[in-house]
Amino acid sequence: MSISRLVRVNELLKREIAEDIHRIFAMSNFDTAALMVVRVDCAPNLRDAAVFVSIFGHEEERDRMISFLNRHRQEITKKMCQRVKLKYTPRLHFKLDGSVEGGDNILAILTDMERENPAAFRDDEEEQNDELEQ
């Protein structure tokens, strides 16, 4: 399978899986608002797909939600197959992705630094504006 086709399949699966999770579990006690599908890495033979999700909440809550998703992956796959037609239906494996949390942590650190020393951040902004004007 070509690389560009695999990228398109990954993006299609990402979108459909995210929609299916919200459709299936919207009326349950599963907090779909705390979950975001970050990316899907499908194997070149389309037999397996790693679904990386970011979950906002405490560590034990994340573990509980990942295990919940892995227990209900057949239901998610079944719903996905109704709209996505592929030669092979990939087995979904849900995994926790920490990149969004890492970004939030960096933004929190920068915000704290700006509160401690606001003059340093304003000077950088003024220099950038002066460079843009020239």
Image (tube, grey):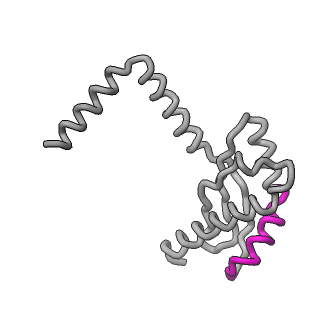
- Residue 46, placed above or below residue 107: below
Residue 91 placement, left or right of 15: right
Asked if residue 78 is positioned above or below residue 28 in the image, the reply reads below
- Residue drawn at point x = 59 percent, y = 67 percent: 10
Q: Residue at x 23, y 38 (%)?
A: 129
Residue lying at 19% horizontally and 36% vertically, measured from the top left: 130
Q: Quarter holding the C terminus?
A: top left
User: Of all residues shown, which one is farthest toward the left?
Assistant: 134
Total marks shown come to 0
Question: For residue 86: magenta?
Answer: yes
Q: Which is more toward the observer, 94 or 22?
A: 22
Position of 129 with respect to 96 (left or right) is left
Residue at 76%, 77% (x, y): give it.
82
Whole-percent x and y of residue 40? Answer: 62, 61
Out of 129 and 75, give the one closest to the viewer: 129
Q: Position of residue 120 (x, y in %)?
A: 32, 22
Q: Is residue 34 left or right of residue 69?
A: left
Figure quadrant of the N terminus:
bottom right
Image location (x, y in percent) of residue 11: 57, 67
Task: Find the magenta span and give its range.
Answer: 71-87
Quadrant location of residue 124? top left
Would you say residue 78 sits in the magenta stretch? yes
Residue sitting at the far top: 116
Q: Nearer the viewer, residue 114 or 53?
A: 114
